[in-house]
Amino acid sequence: MAAKIKADDLGQVSRDFYEQTKFKMLLSFVFAAASLTFLGFSAESGGESTSINNDYDRTNPSDDKYSKFYEAQVSGYGFASFCHFSAFVIALAAAIIISPVLSGSPTEKKNVSSPQELLLESQEPTVANRISAQNESVNPMSPK
């Protein structure tokens, strides 16, 4: 059994990928928590709307002024409930899309539980290394 790799022992690219995966996991939890908060707000607004509507039905005011007042409150809380529920759906979708566990690549899914060194398809040097390699090979000051 291979020993577990610490995040500090990873190469630069692997460490960046590991940190990115952890950040995506954190962001996914934040959006999931926000979605549950919006769901709670939606339930609260819907309950207020229903309660006000039941109050109106129970008291049955004859004055048109009060009936418009109750109707405006019921409609306002109903619309607030709809908006909060829409925010819940959007935040939940964002949490699922961002999550490396639910919709991540296989490498991200492995990296969530333990850091791993990435096996790159090509070991092509970075742009900075290529420029410095060119400068070394074509040095105008070197004797020929």
Image (cartoon, rainbow, N blue to C red):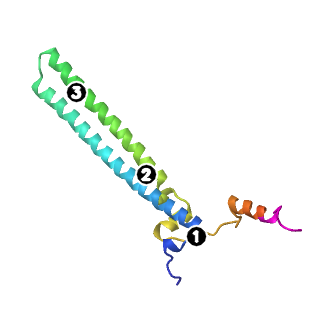
- Quadrant for the C terminus, please: bottom right
| Tag 1: amino acid | Gly
Taking the magenta stretch, the answer to whether it contains residue 98 is: no
| Tag 3: amino acid | Gln
* Residue 88 at x, y percent in the picture: 37, 44
Give the distance between the C-alpha atoms of the residues marked 2 and 1, in whole angstroms: 29 Å
Query: Mark 3: which secondary structure?
Result: helix
Q: Which residues are magenta?
A: 136-144
* Residue 108 at x, y percent in the picture: 53, 63
**Is the C-beta separation of discs 3 and 1 under 8 Å?**
no
Determine which quarter of the picture holds residue 130. Answer: bottom right
Q: Which mark is residue 73?
A: 3
**Is the C-beta separation of discs 2 and 1 under 8 Å?**
no
> In this rendering, would 134 be left or right of 57?
right
Give the distance between the C-alpha atoms of the residues marked 3 and 1, in whole angstroms: 60 Å
Q: Main secondary structure of the magenta part?
A: loop
Image point (65%, 67%), residue name: 120
Determine which quarter of the picture holds residue 124. Answer: bottom right
Q: Residues within 10 Å of mark 1 (few under 14, many from 20)?
A: few
Compared with residue 1, is residue 141 higher up or lower down, i.e. above or below? above
Is residue 14 or residue 119 the one in the foreground? 14
N-terminal label among 2 and 1: 1
Badge nearest the viewer, 3 or 2: 2
Compared with residue 90, is residue 77 higher up or lower down, i.e. above or below? above
N-terminal label among 3 and 2: 3
Badge nearest the viewer, 3 or 1: 1
Compared with residue 102, is residue 8 higher up or lower down, i.e. above or below? below
Query: Mark 1: which secondary structure?
Result: loop
